[in-house]
Amino acid sequence: MKDNPQTHFPWHEICQHPHRRKFVVDGKELLKALIIFAVFPIGAPLLGILLKNRPRLQDLVFGLMCFMTINGFLGAGNWGLTLDSHEFYRGHARGYHFYFNHAAGIALFIAAMLERPLTLPRRPPGLLLYLLYCAVSSISIVNAVRPDFHWMAMHKMLFVLCIFLGAYGYLRTPGRILFFFRVMAVVLCWQALVVLKTRYLDGQYQARGTFEHQNALAMYANLISMTLLALALGPDHPRNKWLFAGFLASCLIIVAALSRASMAIFGVGVVCILMVSLLQRPSAQRLILIGGFVAAAFLGGLLSIDTIVSRFHDDGNTASAEYRAVLNQAALAMLRDNPLGVGWNNFAEVINEPYPYSEFVWQWLRDRNHTVNTDRVNSCVESHYFLILAENGWLGLVAFLCLILWTLFRNVRAALTLHDTTLRLVSLGIAMGCLLNYAQSHLERVLTQPRNLMLWMILLAVTARIEQIRRDQRSVKDNRPSRRRHTHPEEMPAEDPLIV
């Protein structure tokens, strides 16, 4: 872009935007509200009471909660209800959405509290930092031209804690942590079947599976696949075959999604995990698994090489990169005008008319000799970090960086210091999967997508639980009382963590 447009704008004059509509409580909204009230404040606690001291039933509910993170069965679905829906809005929250698997999270946490009220710490590790991020980000409401959009984002980020707390309450033993990854292996295998259907039966060039966008699907697979690979290369166990099958399913998903960045960073992550695995303990099993993976990757590459090459040479690649850069410039202009941010979930509002930041897009279109249609709806910035800068300001970005660095530090430390081989591998895989997602977040705001956000919350719960196990082990070693008033024997790591 040749010259940046002037963006200083009298915000107080546009608070009454002509396209703003009032929330109308009609019969349909009232019915949805009644169902939500019946499911979440009433049904979820009752289910939690029912789950008390019923471990097999808890396994079933937790497995369903994990499966429902893909939010669809044979295609993109909507397993929940939305109040005040704005389905054509381009922001990352389009209403007050209530996903049904959040009710499962509430039930699992209540069951954990009823079973062992003294064994849970005052707060799960990392929870306070996440709440701090949400609190700091909420300050930007002072500049929001659409406060209702801001509250939608706040609702989404706080309500997803039901998933975090439910997973943290359930994942009390190494056996249950392994059960989670076996469940996710099954979820990825199912997702791979749906991807094959959408690719070859529905004719999607970039398969999306049950997701709304192929990039979100690929990064979902990236986030969990690193841990599946690390565990599959770990101590021999019959059920490790499921883990490796889930990893192979993630390979198929990423290739079929044809997300260029996802394929590149997936390769980097796999190489890193393989190198660490071989350096840690070379074995015949690991060499066989690595050989099998290389053979499968080579065969899959041969079958799809033409499609992959054509994807990297698409005509729209240059325009897409330019458009991303233009939106990043608009985000920086919003930050200059509003150091606290323009308001959570407000970027997609102020990048359009009558706000001045739309001029960034119009000028880019003029430079490409395209006709400018000021009625078109511009997209939201793709980079997660530029999005946070624009919507939540410097404070929001610093708080978010502290949160993601906490996840990396805790997992890397656990991978280096824990005595339990399996938990070390889990921490290594989570660290690598999160690192890949954090890196691609510069290009894709995948962690704002509900499906990816829910999976990330479960992995943060695993991180918090392993951190609590580490603290308990440290307390026993140093003859210090644990931060918890009581440690139940079932929560202590087993001698052989592969025994469920």
Image (cartoon, grey):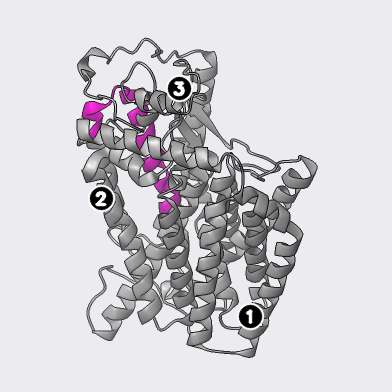
Instruction: Give the quarter of the image for residue 409.
Output: bottom left
205 in magenta: no
The residue beneath circle 3 is: 84
Tell which tag, 1 or 2, sits nearer the viewer: 2
Earlier along the polypeptide chain: callout 1 or callout 2? 1
How many numbered marks appear?
3
The image shows residue 162 at horizontal and vertical percentages of: 42, 47
Give the Cα separation between the discs numbered 3 and 2. Answer: 29 Å
154 in magenta: yes
Residue range of the region highlighted in magenta in the rendering: 140-166
Q: Which amino acid does label 2 sit on?
A: Ala
Q: Relative to the observer, which residue lies in front, 36 or 431?
A: 431
Tell which tag, 3 or 2, sits nearer the viewer: 2
The image shows residue 94 at horizontal and vertical percentages of: 46, 29
Give the Cα separation between the discs numbered 1 and 3. Answer: 49 Å
The residue depicted at 41 percent of the width and 23 percent of the height is 362
Q: What residue type is labelled 1?
A: His
Earlier along the polypeptide chain: callout 1 or callout 3? 3
Instruction: Give the quarter of the image for residue 489.
Output: bottom left
- For the C terminus, the image quarter is bottom right
Do the residues bearing badges 3 and 2 touch, measured as CB atoms within 8 Å? no
Which secondary structure, mark 2? helix
Instruction: Judge whether 199 appears above or below 240 on screen.
Output: above
The image shows residue 133 at horizontal and vertical percentages of: 27, 47
Say few, some or many: other residues with alpha carbon within 10 Å of mark 2 (under 14 / 14 to 19 / 20 or more): many
The residue beneath circle 2 is: 399
The residue beneath circle 1 is: 237
Q: Which amino acid does label 3 sit on?
A: Asp
Which secondary structure, mark 1? loop
Horizontal side of residue 379 vs 151, given as left or right: right
